Image (cartoon, rainbow, N blue to C red):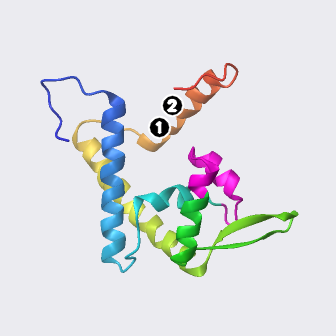
């Protein structure tokens, strides 16, 4: 989407567009580095999994997905070799999903690529005259929103 000054473009549209562009660039960079099976659909797992493993129900809740959708995504990522499932040591009836060595290598590489992509976007913001700690401002704004809405249960 090109930014069109003839119509009002909301902040949410602009933020989604920027997130999509960042994601697209990450996938391109990962593919160029030999991580060929990357997809934006994998990000809810990579973004929410704990180092020691995470239950599918927890991954689903963190990602705002249904348990069934997350389960399908996890199975797909297991087939690609990114994840493995094992018994939860705290509850033998439950299963934990954890990154395999391939998954850990993928995440390590992605972290470096993400840092480069974020630096480039910060330079774009500075070039546009917005020279603040953008990450810090976003975190502070999200925390303020959460504290305003925690008691009422209100959602956007």
Q: Residue shown at 85%/68% (left/top)?
A: 89
Q: Is residue 113 above or below residue 119?
A: below
**Magenta span:** 50-70
Q: Is residue 140 above or below residue 114?
A: above
- Which one is in front, 19 or 61? 61
**Image position of 49 (left or right of 95):** left
Picture mark count: 2
Residue 98: horizontal and vertical position, in percent?
Answer: 66, 69
- Placement of the N terminus among the 4 image quadrants: top left
Residue 55, percent from left and from top? 71, 59
Residue 138 is labelled as 1
Residue 84 in the image, given as x and y percentages of width and height: 65, 74
Q: Is residue 39 magenta?
A: no
Mark 2 sits on what residue? 141
Residue at image point 17% right, 23% down: 7
Q: Quadrant of residue 81?
A: bottom right
Q: Is residue 55 visible?
A: yes
Q: Viewed as shown, does residue 32 lie left or right of 37?
A: left
User: Circle 1 sits in a helix, a strand or a loop, which is it?
Assistant: helix
Query: Marks 1 and 2: in contact by CB < 8 Å?
Result: yes
Is 137 placed above or below 8 here? below
Q: Secondary structure at mark 2?
A: helix
Residue 61 coordinates in the image, percent (x, y): 64, 46
Left or right, residue 125 beside residue 53: left
At label 2, counting other C-alpha atoms closer than 10 Å, the crowd grade (few under 14, some 14-19, many 20 or more) is few
In the image, 131 versus 15, the foreground residue is 15
Q: Residue at x 34, y 30 (%)?
A: 11
Residue 107 numbered mark, or none: none
Q: CA distance from mark 2 to mark 1?
A: 5 Å
């Amino acid at each position: 989407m090109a930014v069109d000054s003839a119509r009002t473009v909301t902040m949410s549209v602009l933020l989604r567009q920027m997130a999509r562009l960042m994601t697209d660039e990450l996938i391109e960079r990962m593919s160029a580095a030999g991580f060929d099976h990357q997809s934006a659909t994998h990000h809810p797992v990579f973004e929410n999994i704990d180092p020691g493993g995470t239950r599918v129900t927890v991954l689903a809740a963190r990602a705002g997905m249904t348990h069934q959708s997350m389960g399908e995504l996890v199975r797909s990522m297991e087939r690609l070799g990114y994840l493995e499932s094992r018994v939860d040591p705290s509850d033998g009836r439950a299963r934990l999903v954890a990154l395999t060595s391939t998954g850990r290598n993928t995440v390590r590489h992605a972290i470096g690529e993400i840092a480069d992509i974020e630096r480039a976007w910060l330079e774009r913001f500075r070039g546009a005259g917005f020279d603040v700690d953008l990450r810090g401002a976003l975190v502070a704004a999200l925390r303020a929103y959460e504290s305003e809405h925690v008691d009422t249960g209100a959602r956007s």
